[in-house]
Amino acid sequence: MKRPAIFKFRLYVAGEGPNSIEAIANLTALCEAHLAKRHEIEVIDVVKQQGRALADGVMLTPLLVKLSPAPVRRIVGNLSPGEPVLLALGLPAAL
């Protein structure tokens, strides 16, 4: 029996500003609603890890990178709930 894919996300934020907090909350809610127990989220604060942000080519925040399953996808913004975010991540609106 094939196991469901684990979705791996990396979210780049800048400090604890409103957009950063909202992006973290929105991603967490999206994962809990659509990918329960099938996701991993890594949050990178570019204020604290500037070298990492530069090495990864991050120019704007919040930036979400879906690392797996392929294809890799990038979304800039606070990840406001809705079908456009799901579709951008390659997820059907109703999982």
Image: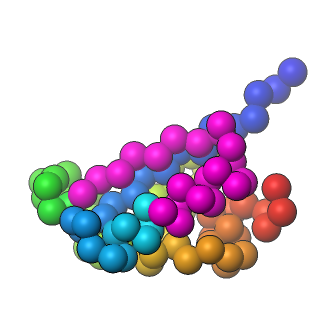
Whether 41 is drawn above or below 26: the answer is above
The stretch of residues the image draws in magenta is: 25-45
Task: Tell me the colour scheme of the image.
Answer: rainbow
Q: Is residue 26 magenta?
A: yes
- Which residue occupies the extreme top position in the image? 1
Q: Nearer the viewer, residue 79 or 64?
A: 79
**Point 79% across, 63% down: residue:** 92
How many numbered circles are shown?
A: 0
Q: On the picture, is 72 further left or further right than 33? A: left
Considering the image in quadrants, where does the N terminus appear?
top right
Percent position (x, y) of residue 8? 53, 44
Q: Nearer the viewer, residue 38 or 71?
A: 38
Q: On the picture, is 63 further left or further right than 56? A: right
Q: On the picture, is 71 further left or further right than 9? A: right
Image quarter for residue 13? bottom left
Considering the image in quadrants, where does the C terminus appear?
bottom right
Image quarter for residue 38? top right
Percent position (x, y) of residue 47? 15, 62
**Point 76% across, 28% down: residue:** 3
